[in-house]
Image (cartoon, rainbow, N blue to C red):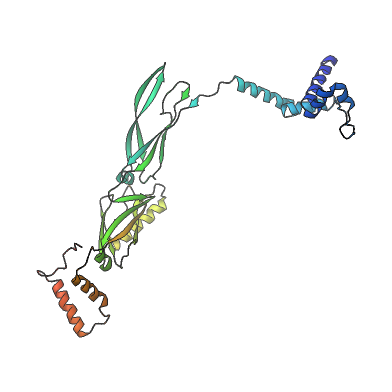
Amino acid sequence: MDENEAEEFFAICEAYDVLSNPKTKGTYDLYGEETLKSGLFDSTGTKVAPYRFDPKTTPAQVFERFFGTNNPYEALELIASQFETLTTEPPPAKGAAKIYPLELTLEEIFHGCLKRVKHKRMVQKDDITIEEDRELTIDVKPGMPSGTRFIFEGEGNIQEKTVPGPVIFVLKPRPHPLFSRRGDDLVYKVTLPLYQSLIGALIEIPTLDGRTLKIPTKDVVTPGTVITVQGEGLPRPNATAADVAAAAAAAAAAAAAATGLAATPSTAAAVRGSLVIEINLLFPAHLTETQKMLFKAAFFLPPIPNEEQKKAVRDFEAAFFHETKGWSNCNSKN
């Protein structure tokens, strides 16, 4: 750089240094360059230090303020990247996602399935828009959670200067006549007559894999009672090999206990959630005086009856269970 070029460079740096600082720029605008460099008095009578341009340090400071670095190579890379940004065409926008529900039966979720689904998309080409039918296949693994999203990138509408967005199917269980889903658990609601809640009942439940569970109630059942049967819910998709072995052992033990459960886990559901049985009670609409009396007799029977009371119980039992005249097998209609 020759002497003239150096002077010109310093003059540019000085001008930038003055004009980029609001304080020095204000002094320059109001009083001019001479006052700026010689100094002026403020409102208190104190002289303000004059502006000084140091050719040894000020140009470097100006360079760093302007480029954000005092490294000239880093500044060149910054300039190059900014020019590249200006000359590079931005990527096309991505189209909106199209979201559909994927409604499946609990049987389909239990066993897993390959589900073929169809959707329509708009295809724009040469100012002409047509409707296109598309068919997709969804691999539903056993027990997949509700709300699972199956995403197909690039299956959305095709428009000029736009990348097709995704098509998304969201798993949603259909209402089932017997069960509702709660995570990995199946919920079964049953209503028992009042007399069964007191003397016990055998609840028979058909399963999603074709068996029939027989769940006994041994204690007195109150409204809102919940019975949980482990291993009879939906499959858990993320089960480990250890979980599978534990589930098989639990199922075998349940079968040995004569609960009516499967002896081995099904092929599609080695590890499963629970079956939650929620019990409600059906109270009789009314009772006859005789029925009320018999209820009192049952509740007030002494723990250790005397001989006369024992004979009365035996006579009642004989009449109740009589093959032709008894009423032990009659269903209550109240």
Q: Quadrant of residue 109?
A: top left
Q: Tell me: residue 113, above or below residue 249.
A: above
Q: Is residue 263 visible?
A: no
Point 10% across, 70% down: residue: 325
Residue at image position (13%, 74%) is 319
Tell me if 168 is positioned left or right of 302 in this view.
right
Percent x, y of residue 295: 23, 72
Q: Is residue 315 visible?
A: yes
- Quarter of the figure with the C terminus: bottom left
Residue ranking furthest to the front: 43
Query: Is 320 on the left or on the right of 70, as rendered?
Result: left
Q: Which x, y percent locates residue 134?
A: 35, 28
Q: Quadrant of the N terminus?
A: top right
Q: Position of residue 111 (x, y in %)?
A: 32, 45
Residue 284 image position (x, y, % from top left): 24, 63
In this picture, residue 19 sits left or right of residue 111: right
Q: Quadrant of residue 204?
A: bottom left
Specify whether 33 is left or right of 248.
right
Q: Is residue 21 above or below residue 238?
A: above
Q: How many marks?
A: 0
Q: Residue, x 60% and y 19% (percent of image)?
A: 87
Residue found at x 32% / y 34%: 116
- Tell which residue pokes out farthest to the left in this image: 324
User: In the picture, residue 251 is in which quadrant?
Assistant: bottom left
Q: Is residue 84 above or below residue 258?
A: above
- In the image, residue 37 above or below residue 221: above
